Amino acid sequence: MVIFDIGGVLVPFNESQISARLKKFTSISETEIFYQIFRSPLHYDFLQGKVQPVSFFNQIRSVLKLNLEFDQFKKVYREVWLNQPNRQCIEFMESCQKKAITVGLMSNIDIIGLEYLLSRFAFLNQCTFGVYSCYARSIKPQPEIYRQVEQRSPANAGQMLFIDDSFENIKAAHIRGWQTYHYQKYI
């Protein structure tokens, strides 16, 4: 069984471009925009599905004094995901599937990003299962999200290979007995 992370492994992302795009809707600095959207406790709650998209937007709009509506925000927010998926990792994923190796996904992702990616990239829908932080109510490297993967996996821990771009997430999987690969370069 092979479990892929999405962001930074299968599909590259660039959080900083959102700050630049939202700057035209506020007088707040790009640095503060970035922090409030991607490094605040609110964002971690959003990733875990504890805050719904409209509530996330309303709180962000209030803090950043954004002059835009939810649909505009959603369009800009989805631009974190770049349009060119990682062909090398996708080819590996497809070769695993051709060999009848179970392929799953585990990702720290909010519902806006997840809905966008699932509608945009068919290869994500071809995996046997996905455990996403917005539904798991847990983010990597917390043990709960790994436990949910183990529950859904037909393999035992020693038969699972997890590919992620975060060393911290890889370490958490390794502690559970998973095989791991720290993906460090998007080609």
Image (tube, rainbow, N blue to C red):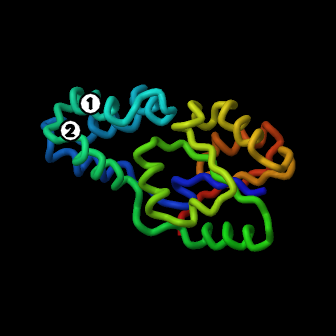
Q: Is residue 143 left or right of residue 159?
A: left
Residue tagged by mark 2? 29
Q: Amino acid at mark 1?
A: Asn
Against 112, is 142 above or below? above
Q: Position of residue 37 (x, y in %)?
A: 34, 36
Residue tagged by mark 1? 58
Q: Position of residue 43 (x, y in %)?
A: 41, 33
Q: Amino acid at mark 2?
A: Ser
Q: Are marks 2 and 1 in contact (CB under 8 Å)?
A: no
Q: Quadrant of residue 120?
A: bottom left
Against 74, is 93 above or below? below
Against 38, is 63 above or below? above
The residue lying toward the viewer, choosing from 143 and 165, is 143
* Label 1: which secondary element: helix
- Is disc 1 surrounded by few (<14), some (14 to 19) or many (20+) residues within 10 Å? some
Q: Position of residue 7 (x, y in %)?
A: 52, 53
Task: Give me the residue at 24% from left, 41% from top.
Answer: 70
The residue lying toward the viewer, choosing from 40 and 49, is 49
Task: Give me the residue at 40% from left, 45% from top.
Answer: 112
* Label 2: which secondary element: loop
The C terminus - image quarter:
bottom right
